[in-house]
């Protein structure tokens, strides 16, 4: 599992794309994004990858954590696997670049309810006067490739934070593999299997 990194300062720390280059529109969009107040059912994560990469349900996820200052372990540490679809089925998604395929990840109905519960738990901790820091991250967990061996992965991200909002490109296309520490790079490359077919 490889975490898409990038730090944006909002009420709950948002990790959206790490060492990748954040777009100006992405910074503006995320500055007004509060993960504790948004409707999980309306959240969308766009993942732009090479056409040789195939993503399926569970190949990407959202993680939410919240840790009280001074405590060794987070009080909240939850993972939500994303349901993946091709962006050609999504109205308003920007067109793919040459050689790119864009996937969209959304929460299942059950996980939308579960994320609501996580939001309420964190808000309850804050209302009790506890001081802490949280994270909201989109993570790649694997996938498959029709091109072997995989050594790089040009990648960009999009986000849609509500039903009345537009899809915003949050990070520009750059090599995702190159942004990972050596141990995570090896783990991620091993998690991307060879596709059974070429569809």
Image (tube, grey):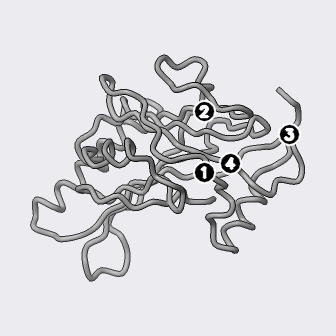
Cβ atoms at labels 2 and 4 below 8 Å apart: no
User: Which quadrant is the C terminus positioned in?
Assistant: top right
| Mark closer to the chain start, 2 or 3 | 2
**Which element is circle 3 on?**
loop
Task: Compare residues 74 and 13 and report the one nearer the observer.
Answer: 13
Find residue 140 and name its label. 1
- How far is the residue under mark 1 from the one under mark 4? 13 Å
Of mark 3 and mark 4, the one earlier in the sequence is: 3
Q: Is label 2 in a helix, a strand or a loop?
A: strand
Please tell me the numbered disc located at residue 146.
3
Disc 4: CA contacts within 10 A as few (<14), some (14-19) or many (>=20) = some
Which residue is label 2 attached to?
103
Tell me which label, 2 or 4, sits earlier in the chain.
2
Across and down, in percent, residue 10 comes to 26, 55
Q: CA distance from mark 2 to mark 4?
A: 14 Å
Corner quadrant of residue 116:
top left
Please tell me which residue is depicted at 50% across the width and 24% down the height of the picture: 93
Do labels 1 and 3 touch, CB within 8 Å? no
Q: Which residue in the protein does label 4 denote?
A: 154
- Label 1 crowd bin: few (<14), some (14–19), many (20+), radius 10 Å: many
């Amino acid at each position: 599992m490889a975490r898409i990194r990038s730090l944006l300062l909002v009420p709950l720390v948002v990790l959206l794309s790490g060492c990748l280059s954040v777009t100006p529109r992405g910074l503006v969009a995320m500055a007004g994004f509060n993960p504790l107040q948004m409707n999980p059912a309306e959240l969308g994560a766009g993942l732009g990858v090479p056409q040789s990469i195939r993503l399926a349900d569970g190949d990407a996820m959202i993680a939410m954590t919240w840790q009280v200052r001074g405590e060794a372990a987070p009080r909240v540490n939850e993972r939500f696997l994303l349901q993946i679809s091709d962006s050609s089925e999504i109205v308003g998604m920007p067109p793919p670049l040459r050689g790119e395929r864009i996937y969209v990840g959304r929460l299942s109905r059950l996980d939308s309810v579960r994320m609501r519960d996580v939001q309420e738990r964190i808000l309850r901790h804050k209302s009790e006067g506890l001081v802490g820091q949280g994270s909201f991250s989109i993570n790649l967990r694997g996938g498959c490739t029709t091109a072997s061996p995989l050594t790089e992965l040009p990648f960009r991200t999009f986000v849609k934070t509500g039903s009345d909002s537009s899809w915003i490109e949050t990070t520009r296309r750059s090599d995702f593999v190159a942004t990972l520490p050596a141990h995570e790079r090896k783990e991620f490359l091993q998690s991307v299997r060879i596709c059974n077919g070429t569809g």
